[in-house]
Amino acid sequence: MVNIYPPAPTGSAQGTQQPGVQEFGRPTQWRRERYRDGVFSHELDTEWERLQLLESVLDHHTISRLRALGVGPSTRCLEIGGGAGSVARWMAEQGARTTVTDLDTRFVDGLAADGVEVLRHDAYVDDFPAGSFDVIHCRYVLVHLPDQEQVISRIASWLAPHGVLVVEEPAFFPIENAPHPAYRKVMLAFRRHLERVVGTDTAWARALPVPLEGGGLVDVGFDARLQLIAGGDAEAEWWRLTLEQTRAAIVAEGTVQDHDFDEAYAELRSPAFHDVSLAVFTAWGRRPGQ
């Protein structure tokens, strides 16, 4: 069964304040409808494959970190923005009492059969009772939201005493001087498109781990890595599908031409293509004990 908690707001994506839910910033900044129904919409034919490719290049690091932080039997876990569901599935396989959320749950609905609670839930406006979880994880979510520091403070309030929040977010700066001209040109146009249409802050991740400290967490840890990319590998194919989903809109903006995408894809398929993709920043911290 898929639940909605709390009840979904009515009206426009700008939203109205719900009982017990604090509003942050200006709700008009949150372009949920454009993200859910436009860029990266689950309605797109290639979105399931794209999310699975992303999991294939990120999950090893994510799972290693969660295992080190003690996810195990009876741990109350929350996975925010479940994507194709691999992290929530792994949590449940460890015996954790797992909840997974997303704006559109169609790709994680099947996890309910494995005992995972599946919720249609917007971390920017929807809430959970304080102290609900022992471990909360979100990946490639916060950069797409406004007021990230305030959102982190809210999420941290959902932790039980000694509970852990783990945040993984990308920064786009490695693409700025990529040596492959078509790839660099198209990627920079894609970055501008995300910033304009979704409101993505493509540099915010470099602020980590300071926002976790600002959210009242302690024992804060941090690491960073560069995602490597080689012609024809999973990372390259993930980028091709990601770019293709936004191709028509970016071309319509006039910043690049249609043939630029074809040339970028040829570079991404070439055995001679080697580069770094995104920088990924991971931070974690514990809620103090009472």
Image: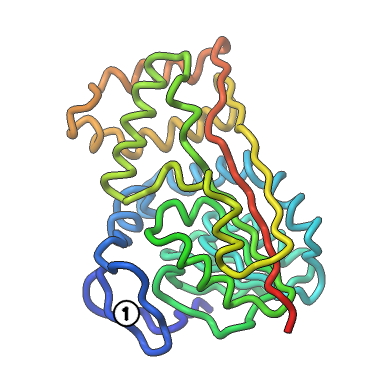
Horizontal and vertical percent for residue 114?
67, 70
Horizontal and vertical percent for residue 139?
56, 53
Number of numbered discs visible in the structure rendering: 1
Horizontal and vertical percent for residue 74?
78, 76
Residue 256, above or below 220:
above
Q: Find numbered disc 1 in the image and state the secondary structure of the residue it sits on.
A: loop
Horizontal and vertical percent for residue 152?
52, 65
Residue placed at 33% from the left, 68% from the top? 25
Residue 210, above or below 123:
above
The answer to which image quadrant residue 108 occupies is bottom right
The answer to which image quadrant residue 32 occupies is bottom left
Q: Quadrant of the C terminus?
A: bottom right
Residue placed at 42% from the left, 42% from the top? 202
Is residue 83 visible to the viewer in this orientation of the structure? yes
Is residue 97 visible to the viewer in this orientation of the structure? no
Q: Residues within 10 Å of mark 1 (few under 14, many from 20)?
A: some
Asked if residue 52 lies left or right of residue 256, the reply is: right
Q: How is the image coloured?
A: rainbow
Residue at the extreme bottom = 19
Which residue was labeled with disc 1?
A: 9
Closer-to-camera residue (124/76)? 124
Residue placed at 28% from the left, 68% from the top? 27
Residue placed at 61% from the left, 27% from the top? 228
Kindly identify the amino acid type of the residue bearing the numbered disc 1: Pro
Asked if residue 183 lies left or right of residue 217, the reply is: left
Residue 266, above or below 24:
above
Closer-to-camera residue (182/112)? 182
The answer to which image quadrant residue 167 occupies is bottom right
